[in-house]
Image: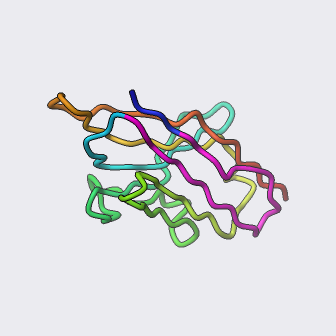
């Protein structure tokens, strides 16, 4: 069983910063790609940023959503099975529930399975 704990969301004024983190634990052989997605009310969930197991931010040709390039930075601590999203210069349109995601290989299996965090609310006031 894999456990995930997301943290770091909250309310911030436009121009402010927040740092999200997502820690995975449990039955994990290795974690491959990791990413952050967000979903605003009435909108579909969208990819915000992704990072490969090697640390590269080029994953399937997508690294950051155009709307967050230059403002958000994704990183990972492999030893801690944790992925981070540093969000700077936040805008009201960044308001959404943010979800972490990871492709995880568990012991005794031959395929990665996608695991999602519970979501954390980010609200940016104008």
Q: What residue appears at the point 76 percent right and 49 percent down from the top-left corner? A: 123
Which quadrant does the N terminus fall into? top left
Q: Could you tell me residue 119's position as x and y percent?
A: 60, 37
Q: Residue furthest bottom?
A: 70
Which span is picked out in magenta?
5-26
> Is residue 110 shown left or right of residue 8?
left
Q: What residue appears at the point 83 percent right and 55 percent down from the top-left corner? A: 125
Q: Could you tell me residue 100's position as x and y percent?
A: 50, 44
Magenta-drawn stretch contains 22? yes
> Is residue 88 shown left or right of residue 34?
right
- Residue in the foreground of this view, choosing between 104 and 16: 104
Q: Could you tell me residue 121's position as x and y percent?
A: 70, 42
- Residue in the foreground of this view, choosing between 22 and 14: 22
Colour mode? rainbow
Q: What residue appears at the point 45 percent right and 64 percent down from the top-left corner? A: 75
Is residue 17 placed above or below 24 in the rendered structure? below
Q: Residue furthest left?
A: 110
| Residue 126 lies in quadrant | bottom right
What secondary structure do most residues of the magenta stretch adopt? strand
Q: Could you tell me residue 43's position as x and y percent?
A: 60, 34
């Amino acid at each position: 069983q894999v456990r995930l704990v997301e943290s770091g969301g909250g309310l911030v004024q436009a121009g402010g910063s927040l740092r999200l983190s997502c820690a995975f634990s449990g039955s994990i052989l290795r974690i491959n790609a990791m990413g952050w997605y967000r979903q605003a009310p009435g909108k579909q969930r969208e990819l915000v940023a992704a990072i490969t197991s090697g640390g590269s931010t080029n994953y399937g040709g997508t690294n950051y959503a155009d709307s967050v390039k230059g403002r958000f930075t994704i990183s990972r601590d492999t030893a801690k099975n944790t992925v981070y999203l540093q969000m700077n210069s936040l805008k009201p349109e960044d308001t959404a529930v943010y979800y972490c995601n990871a492709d995880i290989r568990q012991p005794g299996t031959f395929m990665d399975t996608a695991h999602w965090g519970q979501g954390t609310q980010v609200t940016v006031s104008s």
